[in-house]
Image (cartoon, helix red, strand yellow):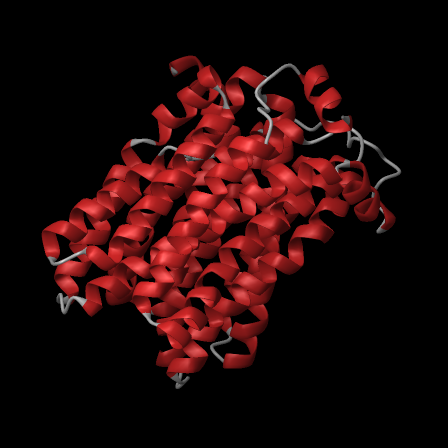
């Protein structure tokens, strides 16, 4: 572990920690910032939605930019664009500027993730990728804890604009890490940076996208649904905000503790078993939500959710890295990221529709069943990707 950490600490782990902390902090800062300048509750909620839309809009263009400029330049451009977006938010506290900057920030973050997957695909050996991606995912989980706390303290001490200015400078640190420690490699497939490359990526990798890609979409949908269903169930049980927060925190602790063991298991026994375990455990735990009777039963279910989410730390990025072809890699990774973002965005929307039509319990049972069916789909349809690159290529073409 220590050798792996040393190898990827500066080019991957440090910038990932900064990016994830800022991204999680913004979930607190942006909605409250909108309210502070006179926005409505609806506009406050929509600002995060615009950021998510920006990510989805950025995935495919980022794949084309990756093919044209390479992963290092793409990550540099994404970090600079993030800094610019945050600076605009700090300097111009108007709803129109905040909305445009949120879209731009989402675009930049989607591009950053595409570049990072490509970089790890090149820099990490197949038997290291699981641990590298899980370490990266672990920093995101730590960012879930540190980011909102940091945002709260900074807003209370200095206000929104100073907080966003600090985030702007922190994002520039990411530029420094990438510029100094990410090794530039020549883009794969110099002629694959045109729009037609996206169509080629779909056609050439259609079997992978219809199996592993669909499995990734299902896992992201169930993950996003879990994050919403847990607090809604707590509210339905008439728990107070402190109790609901404690339930979510306990589940998050279980989740966070598992990120490195999950990566180790991915590298030792494969990616597919972790996919199956995660979808099955998440599906089961979400199905149990309507049976919760109070605080302690909800804590047990939240812990099971944390276990299910924790065992899959980094698995989607790792599988995407395993399957990314050397030719037209940018197009493939862009599509792969888009599938993940569609899953994470559609989960809450689907829950909202089901809760309105049939109630919270039916929504929980439906998402839980989807998780269990997703696990069965992976057993039947998805092949193991943890193998030598030449065997992966045969798998893709077969």
How many numbered discs sit on the rendered protein?
A: 0
Residue 24 visible here: no
Is 228 above or below relative to 178?
Answer: below
Residue 334 visible here: yes
Front-most of residues 376 and 209: 376
In-image side of 149 versus 143 (left or right)? left
In-image side of 342 versus 90 (left or right)? right
Front-most of residues 97 and 255: 255
Quarter holding the C terminus is top right
On the image, the x and y values in percent for residue 21 come to: 39, 48
On the image, the x and y values in percent for residue 71 come to: 68, 36
Quarter holding the N terminus is top left
On the image, the x and y values in percent for residue 221 come to: 48, 53
Front-most of residues 363 and 315: 363
**Residue 353 position by quadrant:** bottom left
Is 6 above or below relative to 182?
Answer: above
Is 242 above or below relative to 39?
Answer: above
Is 43 above or below relative to 198?
Answer: below
Front-most of residues 202 and 24: 202
On the image, the x and y values in percent for residue 94 come to: 50, 80
Residue drawn where x is 44% and y is 63% of the image? 348
**Residue 226 position by quadrant:** bottom left
Residue drawn where x is 45% and y is 33% of the image? 276
**Residue 103 position by quadrant:** bottom right
Residue drawn where x is 38% and y is 51% of the image? 368
């Amino acid at each position: 572990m220590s050798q792996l950490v040393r190898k990827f600490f500066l080019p991957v782990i440090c910038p990932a920690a900064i990016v994830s902390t800022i991204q999680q902090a913004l979930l607190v800062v942006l909605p409250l910032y909108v309210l502070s300048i006179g926005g409505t509750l609806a506009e406050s909620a929509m600002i995060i939605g615009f950021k998510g839309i920006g990510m989805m809009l950025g995935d495919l263009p980022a794949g084309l930019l990756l093919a044209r400029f390479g992963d290092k330049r793409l990550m540099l451009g994404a970090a600079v664009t993030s800094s610019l977006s945050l600076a605009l938010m700090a300097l111009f506290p108007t709803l129109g500027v905040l909305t445009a900057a949120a879209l731009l920030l989402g675009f930049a973050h989607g591009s950053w993730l595409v570049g990072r997957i490509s970089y790890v695909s090149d820099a990490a050996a197949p038997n290291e990728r699981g641990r590298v991606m899980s370490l990266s995912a672990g920093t995101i989980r730590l960012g879930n804890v540190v980011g909102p706390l940091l945002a709260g303290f900074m807003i209370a001490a200095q206000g929104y604009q100073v907080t966003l200015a600090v985030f702007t400078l922190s994002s520039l640190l990411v530029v420094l890490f990438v510029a100094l420690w990410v090794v530039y490699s020549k883009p794969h497939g110099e002629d694959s940076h045109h729009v037609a490359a996206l169509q080629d990526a779909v056609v050439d990798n259609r079997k992978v996208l219809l199996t592993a890609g669909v499995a990734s979409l299902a896992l992201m949908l169930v993950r996003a649904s879990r994050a919403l269903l847990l607090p809604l169930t707590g509210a339905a049980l008439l728990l107070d905000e402190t109790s609901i927060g404690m339930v979510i925190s306990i589940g998050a602790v279980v989740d966070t503790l598992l990120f490195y063991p999950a990566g180790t298991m991915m590298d030792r026994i494969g990616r597919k078993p972790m996919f199956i375990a995660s979808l099955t455990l998440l599906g089961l735990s979400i199905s149990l939500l309507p049976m919760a009777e109070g605080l302690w039963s909800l804590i047990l279910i939240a812990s099971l959710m944390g276990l299910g989410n924790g065992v899959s730390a980094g698995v989607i990025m790792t599988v995407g890295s395993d399957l990314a072809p050397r030719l037209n890699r940018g197009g493939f990774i862009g599509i792969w990221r888009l599938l993940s973002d569609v899953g994470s965005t559609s989960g809450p929307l689907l829950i909202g529709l089901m809760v309105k039509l049939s109630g919270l319990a039916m929504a929980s049972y439906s998402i839980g069943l989807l998780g269990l069916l997703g696990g069965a789909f992976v057993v039947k349809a998805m092949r193991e990707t943890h193998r030598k690159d030449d065997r992966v290529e045969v798998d893709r073409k077969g």
